[in-house]
Image: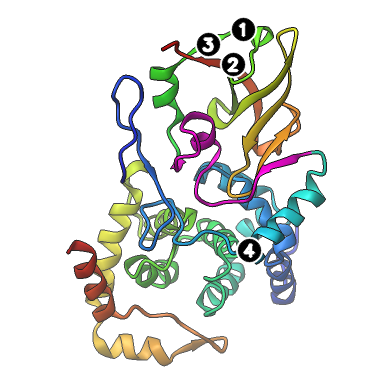
Amino acid sequence: MATFRTSLGHSVPHCHVRPNPVDPCDATEWTQAEIQRKRHYMAKHFPDAEEVRPPSRKYNCFGYAYARAHGWFEEPDLFIDDDFFEVPKDKARRGDVLVYEKDGEIVHSAIVNSVTDGTIETVRSKWGKLAAVIHLPREVHPAYGRPVRLLRRNPG
Amino acid sequence: MKKSLSVTSIEKALTRLADPELNTEIDLASSVNVAKDIIHSLPGVKRLRRDGPKVSKAVLNLLARTDTLKEENLTSIALHILEAYPSEDVKLALAPGIVARWYLGFNTFLAAETFLKAARIEAKSKDVIAVARREAKKIVDKLPPKIVDRHQTQTVDQHPVRTVDKHRTKTAARKKRS
């Protein structure tokens, strides 16, 4: 397990795509053919989602939202506790992070992409092993639950 | 009460689930819990998980096919269905693959969880993979060469059963340590 630290120095478990990977990472990145198939799937099932980064197994939504796509992370709480503070959802700014929960569990996170008068218009987020896309906050798969909290990175 | 599925219906349901057009949905998951949630919502999965031992046998056959493991999402579905049918057969079928690390990505956890349930061993969520590897190794190590040989040639409904290559596993482990 590689080391990635929060602003308070706490180590956050994560993994990378490589031969003999640490769980739950995969051993290989998608091939070009697989990337095309994943794009086709996205275009068919989520036609309004605009791709900003191609499908990848290298990082997930938490890696994208909290660690600049550094790797695959499954414990967003560690980042949230150390690096962010909560702000009202109607006071959003570009770059804030929207947290999605289902049954009380954090299941997805997205970066605020555009805002009008404090209201979130669009977000960008990584959809599992598929693409990073720009989408409306509520236009997500049901397994992503619903947006419940808005976070802002601590100053400094 | 619903009639249980025929073998043909089970195979038809599994064939449908093998379609990437359907199972790519699992790739939307960023964690194993979300993956399980998505798998559970795929058509036919709930029914397959409660229909009975015929399903377990068909899914074990599916997992034993050499091409199934290459289809990671199909393997995820198979492991999630088998989780509902804890048995000695499931335990023995999964142990070699867990030791040899055939399962990658979310399937590492799904295989470990299903194996432990079949072996009636409890573990904390964070320890599931480590405990499963340890317990699976005990099973694989106990398999006498004769049984391993028999497994290498035995077929279940004409599909070859996978076995672990102990020598290769130990060599790989040594390489990893060094």
Mark 3 residue type: Glu
Q: Position of residue B166 (x, y in %)?
A: 26, 78
| Vertical order, B160 against B164 (above or below) | below
Which of marks 4 and 3 precedes in the sequence?
4
Residue A65 versus residue B117: which sits nearer the camera?
A: A65
Asked whether the residues under the numbered discs 2 and 1 touch, taking CB atoms below 8 Å apart as contact, a structural biologist would say yes
Chain for mark 4? A
Distance between mark 1 and mark 3 Cα atoms: 7 Å
Does the magenta portion include A54?
yes
Query: Where does residue B109 sit, x and y in percent of width and height?
Result: 43, 53
SS for dot 3:
strand
Q: Which residue is denoted by mark 4 in the rendering?
A: A32
User: Which of the two discs, 1 and 4, sits closer to the camera?
Assistant: 4
Residue on which the image places disc 3: A86
Badges 2 and 3: C-beta atoms under 8 Å apart? yes
Position of residue A82 in the picture relative to residue B21 (left or right): left
Q: Which residue is mark 2?
A: A150
**Circle 1 is placed at which residue position?**
A88
Magenta span contains residue B121: no
Q: Residue at x 69, y 56 (%)?
A: A38
